[in-house]
Amino acid sequence: MDENKSLTDENSQDIQSESTANEDTSRNESELHSILYSGEYSEYRDDLDLSELEEEKKNDRLSTFSEKEKDTKKDSKPIKTGTKKRKTAIIALACAFAVLIAMYLVLGPVGLDVFGFKEKEEAPIVYTTGEVPGSGKNVWLIFEHIERNNIQSIEVHNEHGTYTAYYSPASDSFHFLGAEALIYDQEMFSYLVVSAGYTVFTERLPKGERSDDLSEYGLSPDDDPAYYIITTRDGKTHKLYIGSPTLDEDQYYAMYEGRDIVYVLEKSVKTSLLADIRDLLTPTLTYPITSQSNDYYTKIPQIYLTLERDEPYLLIEYTRNDTSTEETFGVTIPYMIKYPENIPASTEQTTSLFQYILNMTGDELIEYDILYSYEEFDEDTGEYYTQTDVMPEVLLKHGITRADKALIYYYDGYPSIVYFSDKRTDEDGAEYYFAWSPIMSVLTKISAEKVPFLQWRKVDFIDKAVFNAHIDKVGSIELTDKTSQGKHFIFELTGKGEELKVHETVSDTYLSPNKGSGSDALDPVYNFRQFYKSALFLSAGDEMEMPEDMTLIAQIKMTTRNGYEMNYEFFSYSSDQRCYYTINGEGRFYVKRSKVQKLFSDAQRVIDVLPVDPEADYS
């Protein structure tokens, strides 16, 4: 009985468990039914076929009971479970996935869209009115791309004027007509080449899609639009008009000649085709010299300079290889003032001048290409020849005549000529000149600080050293005291080196080398050499204006052995410490009065055979 009861209880529990499972299954089915046949999916009810789903549920229920029954029969065959089915499905899916991967690897690289994931390409834009495709997707040009190496010329007409850039086979480079000698900005020129030869448009407005009134685009004849003509080296030409900017001023309207279509161009044309050529050209006034050239001083033999109107010009000459200069002074004097008189030039001042005149460049290009040609008759040959000159009205307009300030020099045979107006002052108080270069054919505005030498005087170029000749080249030195003391010395020199002899003619004193007199004995010639050192130490101080009230206190004249004379005059004025002096009548500097007094004191010590110390102060 107990065993039967126990079996009954177990069966009861199994049935109860089965019942609970059935209730869960029914509840799940009810929820699935609700999802499929009601709510947001109800509209698809008629399209759903659930017969297979119902059959699968039925089989599942049957297999569950059958499995329990067959468990009690030891000789029954095993039935496939849900796990085995899933394994089979997984294997099938893996095989299918492997097949798809193989298809992609095999067919994908040849361009087939295996899965349909590729983005569909837009149909290319096609125009049939003369436009040509550029580089890039749906990039179009108004006309064929003309590269730099195929451009013969670019002729530009805009609000600033007209200019032409052209290719010269002789120099294998581009030049600007009428400004061939000028340097131009290479980067800006590249922008010009690209804008003119690669005409990308961002919008195209054919007739019917735009206003018939072209003035709305700044392209009617009355608008006088800017335009350019580009010519290839095989003779093809293209002409493009450029109108007004778009409303946002970020682009420009344009029309190709002979084509009734308005295009929209990038705003880059504003800084290239619509720009002023004066922003492109460098207003160089003198012959360009490369920065690597450091031999300019040997290749510029002369410099002609008009410093002040109505005053004689100044001619400075390079004399390092001048044998006459070497013969005269016996020392290297790189530059001499040859006119108005032959005197040594200050090497320091002349070198400073080079800093301003080499590669002189104006601040603003005012005019260029202002030369004109005319016919002249040659009476000797009886033939006409072509003469070129500048338009005189242009120079007169800017206050330039060839009698004004001028700079002329040659570098290695190439001329540089610049004429300057009088100094002027602009509205901001800045001082400037107008400068005209006939060689470069440009008229520019140049700030006064770039050409300070125009305010220098001839005396500024004179060597400040009072004496600068080698002692062996000196023929005589005469010192005349114009004060009440009235001292007067004339030293005449003969011989050279160790054979140098000196005769002071006023006191009739002969000075000759004192040889063999012992180391303590004073050598009169050596003592005179020390006196000459004192003269060499005499140099100009700062610049000063000529005093209104001054008195001559001393004169010194040095004559070289080949007859060249240097005359110095010293004047006292209100200062007790300084005296104003002149060299051959020209003066603008002062020297310390004590230095002049020391020369006379040392001259007397030479006569008295007393030692001379050139570095000692006057006492």
Image (tube, rainbow, N blue to C red):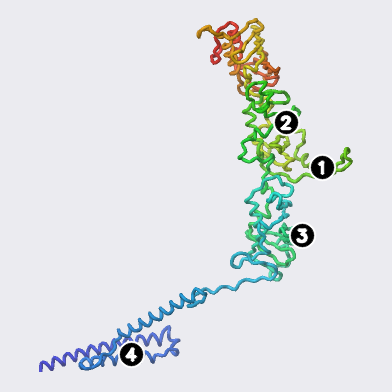
Left or right: where 364 falls relative to 112: right
Give the image quarter of residue 68: bottom left
Q: In the rendering, which numbered label is found on residue 387?
A: 1
Q: Mark 2: few, some, or many residues within 10 Å (few <14, many ≥20)?
A: many
Q: Which residue is mark 4?
A: 57
Q: Relative to 324, is 23 on the left or the right?
A: left
Using a 10 Å C-alpha cutoff, classify the residue at mark 1 as few (fewer than 14 neighbours), some (14 to 19) or many (20 or more): few
Query: Mark 1 vs mark 3: which is more N-terminal?
Result: 3
Determine the CA span between mark 2 and mark 4: 118 Å
C-alpha gap between disc 2 and disc 1: 26 Å
Labelled pair 1, 3 in contact (Cβ < 8 Å) = no
Relative depth, front residue between 432 and 472: 472
Q: Can residue 430 be seen by looking at this rendering?
A: no
From the image, state whether disc 2 or disc 4 is nearer to you: 2
- The answer to whether residue 48 is left or right of residue 501 is left
- Tag nearer the camera, 3 or 2: 2
- Choose top left, top right, bottom left or bottom right for residue 462: top right
